Amino acid sequence: MARYKVSYDKSLCIGAFACVAACPKHFAQAGDKADLIGADNAKDLQEKEIGEEDLETCKDAEGVCPVNCIKVVETK
Ligand code: SF4
């Protein structure tokens, strides 16, 4: 089964929270920016692996982010 990596650059986030609306399982509001749930939230570049079952909502988050700071890529 395919695996995917979600990368989120918190330094670019403007706090629109469209990602939280699109994918509340993986994105949460944290003050004036978002965090990628389950990633190392102390870092600006936050990353985690997801499976096929979460691809659609994470792709939605990638698509709605106004500053394009969310990327979803296939890892294998
Ligand atoms: S949609 Fe983009 S800019 Fe808005 S909170 Fe999410 S990551 Fe930040």
Image (spheres, rainbow, N blue to C red):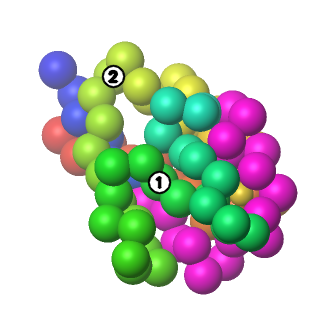
* Image position, residue 11 (x, y; %): 60, 81
- Label 1 sits on a secondary structure element that is strand
Q: Mark 2, residues whose alpha carbon is within 10 Å: few (<14), some, or many (≥20)?
A: few
Magenta-highlighted residues: 7-22
The label shown at residue 54 is none
* Image position, residue 38 (x, y; %): 33, 49
In the rendered image, the quadrant that contains the C terminus is top left
Q: Mark 1, residues whose alpha carbon is within 10 Å: few (<14), some, or many (≥20)?
A: many
41 is within the stretch colored magenta = no
In the rendered image, the quadrant that contains the N terminus is top left
Q: Which residue is mark 2?
A: 52
Q: In which of the image's four quarters is ligand 1 placed?
A: bottom right
Residue sitting nearer the eye, 37 or 56: 37
> Does residue 37 appear to the left or right of 22 in the view shown?
left
- Label 2 sits on a secondary structure element that is helix
Instruction: Report, in whole angstroms, how far the alpha carbon at label 2 lies from the one at label 1.
Output: 17 Å
* Image position, residue 43 (x, y; %): 39, 79
14 is within the stretch colored magenta = yes
Question: Looking at the image, is mark 2 or mark 1 earlier in the sequence?
Answer: 1
- Amino acid type at image mark 1: Leu
- Amino acid type at image mark 2: Glu
> Does residue 50 appear to the left or right of 25 in the view shown?
left
Residue 62 appears in the rendering:
no
The residue located at (22%, 28%) in the rendering is: 2
* Image position, residue 13 (x, y; %): 69, 70
The residue located at (53%, 24%) in the rendering is: 56
Q: Which residue is mark 1?
A: 36
Give the image quarter of residue 45.
bottom left
Residue sitting nearer the eye, 55 or 19: 19
> Does residue 55 appear to the left or right of 18 in the view shown?
left
